[in-house]
């Protein structure tokens, strides 16, 4: 059981961004990934989550290929984006944002009341008070919106979660809160790949830290 990438090659035009990259992420593991700006970390995150198809190589979750179906992401591999504002619709309430995976996968069948209550449970686990949930995304802070994105990831319950600079836009207090929250996800068995420029954070937080340049071969 693992999320694996083998021999992944990805090109943007003439530029080879990923050259035979490989990695293995186990359930419950926190794997840190660092690398200079422009070295291909976000590209790798998109390939691992099935949002981009590599030119060569393969990505598998628990032995079967990762890919999108009719534009929908593979439910086994989630993505937490560095910018919660661009990852959410500003016209949606936080409750609706968090409920999205419940609705899109038919898990909201218990009715609107039950879906709303479940969204509130995930929000509470992500440290969001209930009175914020009826605000729109544009009416809350970046840190609060990132917590809503984590709550949405909790609702989707992926087996693996790729976090692309999840704390890049947050202050120290919000960073510590999000890190604790993601750690609790890993304790529950979710494998986390955390991409960050913050070496100190990764060294303190991840089980293992790798540089993107070391993934080749
Ligand atoms: N849509 C695109 N079209 C062409 N080139 C792109 C595109 N997206 C990214 N690139 C190029 O691919 C390379 C890798 O970009 P990527 O965003 O994966 O790097 P990164 O390591 O995540 O950088 P950062 O740390 O600055 O976020 C860069 O040289 C970038 O210019």
Image (cartoon, rainbow, N blue to C red):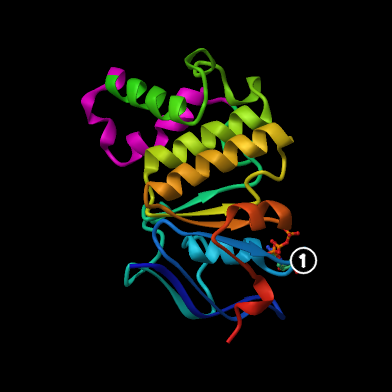
Q: Position of residue 57 (x, y in %)?
A: 48, 81
- Given residues 158 and 101, the one toward you in this image is 158
Magenta part of the protein: which range? 91-113
Specify whether residue 18 is in view. no
Judge left or right: residue 217 versus residue 28: right
Residue at point 72%, 36% (across, down): 172
Judge left or right: residue 111 versus residue 33: left
Judge left or right: residue 67 versus residue 115: right
Question: Residue lying farthest right?
Answer: 37
State which quarter of the image contains the N terminus.
bottom left
Q: Does the segment drawn in magenta span residue 204?
A: no
Ligand 1, what quadrant? bottom right
Q: Does the segment drawn in magenta span residue 98?
A: yes
Specify whether residue 60 is in view. yes
Q: Is mark 1 within 8 Å of ligand 1?
A: yes
Tell me the element at label 1.
Answer: loop
Residue at point 45%, 37% (across, down): 152
Q: Position of residue 205 (x, y in %)?
A: 60, 52
How many discs mark residues in the rendered view?
1
Question: Residue lying farthest top?
Answer: 131
Q: Position of residue 24 (x, y in %)?
A: 47, 71
Above or below, comparing residue 69 to residue 12 in the picture: above
Q: Position of residue 103 (x, y in %)?
A: 34, 34
Q: Which residue is mark 1?
A: 36
Above or below, comparing residue 23 to residue 180 in the picture: below
| Circle 1 residues within 10 Å: few <14, some 14–19, many ≥20 | few
Our reading of the magenta stretch's main secondary structure is helix
């Amino acid at each position: 059981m693992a999320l694996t990438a083998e021999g992944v090659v990805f090109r943007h035009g003439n530029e080879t961004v990923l050259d035979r990259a490989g990695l293995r992420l186990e359930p419950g593991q926190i794997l840190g990934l660092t690398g200079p700006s422009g070295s291909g970390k976000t590209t790798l995150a998109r390939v691992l989550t099935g949002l981009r198809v590599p030119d060569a190589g393969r990505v598998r979750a628990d032995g079967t290929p990762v890919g999108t179906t009719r534009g929908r992401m593979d439910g086994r591999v989630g993505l937490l984006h560095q910018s919660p504002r661009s990852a959410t619709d500003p016209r949606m309430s936080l409750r609706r944002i968090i409920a999205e995976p419940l609705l899109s996968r038919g898990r909201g069948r218990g009715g609107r009341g039950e879906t709303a209550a479940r969204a509130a449970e995930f929000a509470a686990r992500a440290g969001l008070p209930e009175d914020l949930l009826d605000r729109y995304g544009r009416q809350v802070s970046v840190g609060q919106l990132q917590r809503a994105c984590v709550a949405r990831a909790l609702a989707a319950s992926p087996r693996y979660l790729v976090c692309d600079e999840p704390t890049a836009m947050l202050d120290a207090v919000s960073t510590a809160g999000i890190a604790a929250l993601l750690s609790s996800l890993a304790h529950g068995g979710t494998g986390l790949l955390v991409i960050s420029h913050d070496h100190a954070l990764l060294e303190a937080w991840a089980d293992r830290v790798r540089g993107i340049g070391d993934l080749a071969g």
